[in-house]
Amino acid sequence: MTQQRRLTRIAGLLVVPATAALVLAGCSGSGSRSGDGNADSFTFTFATSNNLESPYEALAKAYMEANPDITITTNPTPNDKYGETIRTQFQAGNASDVVQTTPGSGDARGLVPLAEAGFLEPLGDTATSLVPSGSEPLFEIDGKTYGQPMDFTIGAVVASMGTAAQNGIDEWPTTMDQFYAECETLTGQGKSMLALAGAAGPNAGLTAQGIAATRVYEVEPDFNTERAAGDTTFAESTGWKDALQTIIDLKDRGCFQPGAEGGGFDAITNGLAQGTSIGSFIPSGSAVEIASAAPAEANFKVQPFPAAKGEKPFVLASSNYTISINAKSEKKDAAAAFVEWLSTPEAQEKYYEVSGLLPISEYKNLDLSDTIYSPIVDILAEGSYTTLPNNVWPNPAVYEALQVGVQGLLTGQTQIDQVLQNMDNAWGE
Amino acid sequence: MSTTLRSGQQVATETERVVLPRRGGRGRRVPPPRRSGQLKFGYWWWALPGIVFVLGIHYLATGIGGFFAFTNWTGIGAFEIVGLDNFVRIFQDPTKIGALGNTLFLAFGSVIISNILGLGIAVGLNRGLKSRYILRTLFFMPVVLSPLATSYIWKFIFDFNGPLNVILRGAGLDSVARAWIADPTWAIWTVLVVLVWQNIGFAMVIYMAGLAAVPVEIEEAAAIDGTTVWQRFWHITLPSIRPAVAIATTLGLVNGLRVFDQIMALTGGGPAGATENLATQVYKQSFALGNFGYGAALALLLTVIILVFAVIQQRATAERPEEN
């Protein structure tokens, strides 16, 4: 064998382990365990769904400005794949030091299953003190808090009062009779009272929950607890039947835009920005984004959906976003200091300024009389709100059954009893 | 006519006589035989990286995924082996049976329509037409475009306020206009339309390659004998392109069984599950709902279905020995 052939064989034999090493290095390097070698630097993963500046990005920048020796490496992750992304990273051991999560277990990014699997680090007293009263099961396991709430999101109708006024609606309707009357007036003008993204499950689901706030939770505030205990079911609940019947009535009375059952999120954005719809069930923070695309006179306000006869207005209001620390983080102290800072008035005001979402610890101190929240200030003060129900439900399948069910009701594929039965079946999974 | 080339070997045509190598012909030197040990080592040596990649990335990963089909893993934390429970649940759930039906409908619908239209276009653009090169490019273009991007364009076309309904209303057919992708009856057909539109070009290219090998002389001889166009197509062209039919239908069927992008972009599986197929259910169960074990069972079922249909289809379109 010649010298050249021997060298070729040796080089060839090295190809396999070298290639394997490169591949494995590539795999392990795809995560982001730590910001850099600095002991005070760390990584931060959060969800993002548009090209506007994320409030979490803004908070990270503000923290770095206040602490020049600290570097935060941010990992904005697409919102639609966020849950599965962080689950995969936690499972692989390469999740960021600080991770945005959601309360409860009704979502793939829910902190309860992540904490139960040992992926999250218990947080300190500050996080515990921020947990809204009555919502402890969404944030805590065995007395330990695993997510620090960030926001106080309102789930109600975000309505353009400017568009309403242009169409002769000077006051937001407070009864269903008034609401249906306005629907019929607008239908004649080729417009609609509500824009609905019927083909987008999350909007169909939020609409159903927003209506259920007045029909179910105003009457039975402990419905979810009773359902968990097996004392009631969705199928037995007259409130839930009424809520789903209201969706059918809204459709039949022309309150949704034509073709609402096939609408996507663009139907809401275009409808509200162009003034062909008055309002929509969307998270209150989204009003800020839509307002940027609408004319200045649009005048968006968060309005309560009319209650059923004899009942009082009730809205959804809860923390939907939390911040957690990776249990395997090597920078826990730096991460904990950052999470602690997020609760300060300075950070909370920055969060409100960028996101439009009410901050969890500061919203009670804010003057909301001249903001989009002005119509519901009294409702919040009276405590006439409930947490987002699907955060409390035991698994994402229950909410999925509701979303699919609402689509089916809009198209006539399913009946109310069938939808509620499917939700009960999903609860048991 | 046959020509004896060398002892015991006969060739049928002049072409074969020229092409087939002769003993000592063209002065090509036969290399001395290598020692068997060196030869075997050389094979392994160069194939090993590829074998490692294929085994590790494809078969090992698929095997592990198949294992999870028999567990209740949620995607995080511990799991238990649950035997065939996941498969029992699949066949007891009407929505999964519906998804299986949609999978087969889309696969067979797209493969049949795409291949008939693709073959028709290929025959039409095979010879003669002056603009055939431009038309071939236009018909093939959907194949190279992103399924996701084109599906969003189709979604706009099928939208309630989209161009299709504008045309229908303009033609006075207001009662026909509807939210196509949210219509329980028509939504699955919109998916089929997009699939066929995107697959026609692929089938066309395969058939054009097959048609290029059909001897013109035979068709001319048949034409002189007084056969009709349909007779020539049925008795000469189609039997001649049987391998192309086998490839086009097999690939079309496999792609049709696992279609995902178009459904997710167009309907998301809606309305109320009317366009769900096994692939979208695999995704939703595994990643959206955190039922990884159940999703793996659906994926395994889909793999078996693809395998079975691919084998049946290959057998059905294989050339029979007597035709060789």
Image (cartoon, coloured by chain):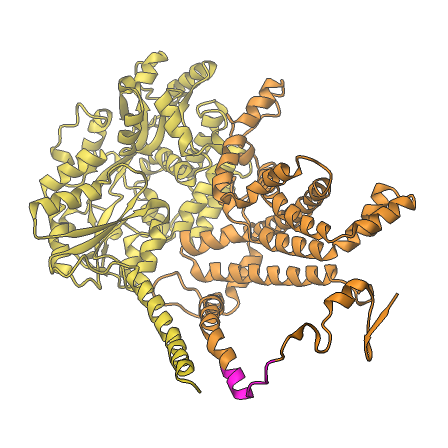
Chain colours: A yellow, B orange
A252 or A239: which is nearer to us? A252
Depicted B180 relative to depicted B71: above or below: above
Residue range in magenta is B31-41
- Work out which residue is located at the far right of the displayed protein and give it: B225
Q: Quadrant of the C terminus of chain B?
A: bottom right
Res A301 → quadrant: top left
User: Where residue B14 sits in the image (x, y, percent)?
Assistant: 80, 63
Depicted A355 relative to depicted A332: above or below: above
Q: Is residue A362 visible?
A: no
A73 or B295: which is nearer to us? A73
- Looking at the image, residue A368 sits to the left or right of residue B161; the answer is left
- Looking at the image, residue B19 sits to the left or right of residue A274; the answer is right
The residue depicted at 55 percent of the width and 50 percent of the height is: B259
A345 or A99: which is nearer to us? A99
User: Where residue B213 sits in the image (x, y, percent)?
Assistant: 73, 53
Q: Quadrant of the N terminus of chain B?
A: bottom right
Depicted A412 relative to depicted B268: above or below: above
Q: Answer whether residue A327 is magenta in the image.
A: no
Res A33 → quadrant: bottom left
User: Where residue B150 sits in the image (x, y, percent)?
Assistant: 51, 39
- Looking at the image, residue B26 sits to the left or right of residue A93; the answer is right
- Work out which residue is located at the far front of the displayed protein and give it: B27
The residue depicted at 11 percent of the width and 33 percent of the height is: A365
- Looking at the image, residue A279 sits to the left or right of residue A62; the answer is right
User: Where residue A222 sits in the image (x, y, percent)?
Assistant: 30, 44
The residue depicted at 62 percent of the width and 17 percent of the height is: B172
Q: Is residue A158 visible?
A: yes
